[in-house]
Amino acid sequence: MSSFTTPLVVSPLPDGRRWRLYLAFVYHVGDRWSRDVICVPRGFITDFASIPKVIFWLLPWWAKFSKPSPLHDWLYTAQQIQGKPITRRKADDIFYEAMLIAFRDHISGKLVAFIEYWAVRLFGWPAWHFRKEVRDQQ
């Protein structure tokens, strides 16, 4: 089973919509002992889940503020794992895997993970391409 191995420590920014990570945050892809490790760096800024208001009212409050969202934001920003490029589908699949881990104790966790996964699959391409363009210009 995949694993988050460090706590998520964040603080809100003055705009009230974004949060800064105060500690690096680690996730092992696939299983706890995997060598595919994603480290979201200290100082990274996340908006947690960018859930459209139409969908947000369907989801429980804990779905927005959870570990998988900043992990997914980082994957869309970096578009790589340990220097190896990844596809958007891979980033979204890791997000789904991470949600199943993080939401496993919630009665509606699998349903919430399914809804959020399909939301990013259907509507995440503009964010992926925008971040790719920004990264390529640097």
Image: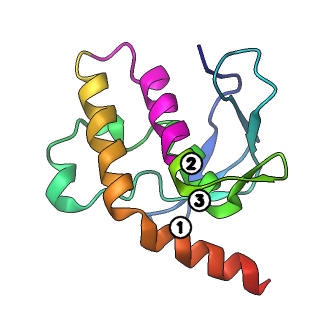
Return the residue at label 3.
76
Residue 12 vs residue 95, the one in the foreground: 95
Report the Cα–Cα distance between label 3 and label 1: 6 Å
Indicate the quadrant where residue 45 lies: bottom right
> Which residues fall within the magenta stretch?
91-106
Is residue 1 visible in the rendered image? The answer is: yes
Q: Residues within 10 Å of mark 3 (few under 14, many from 20)?
A: many
| Sequence order check, earlier mark of 1 and 2 | 2
Q: What element carries label 3?
A: helix
Report the Cα–Cα distance between label 1 and label 2: 10 Å
Picture residue at 51% right of the left edge, 50% below the top? 89
Amino acid at circle 2: Ala
- Marks 2/3 in contact by CB < 8 Å: the verdict is yes
Q: Is the magenta stretch mostly helix, strand or loop?
A: helix
Q: What element carries label 2?
A: helix
Amino acid at circle 1: Trp
Task: Give yes or no for residue 99 being in the magenta stretch.
Answer: yes
Picture residue at 36% right of the left edge, 43% below the top? 117
Return the residue at label 2.
91
- Marks 3/1 in contact by CB < 8 Å: the verdict is yes
- The C terminus sits in image quarter: bottom right
Q: Residues within 10 Å of mark 1 (few under 14, many from 20)?
A: some
Indicate the quadrant where residue 37 lies: top right
The number of callouts visible is 3
Q: In the shown orientation, is residue 84 left or right of residue 28? A: right
Q: How crowded is mark 2: few (under 14 residues within 10 Å), some or many (20 or more)?
A: many
Q: In the shown orientation, is residue 76 left or right of residue 104? A: right
Amino acid at circle 3: Tyr
Q: Where is residue 40 in the image (x, y as percent from the top left)?
A: 72, 46
Return the residue at label 1.
128
Report the Cα–Cα distance between label 2 and label 3: 7 Å
Residue 124 vs residue 60, the one in the foreground: 124
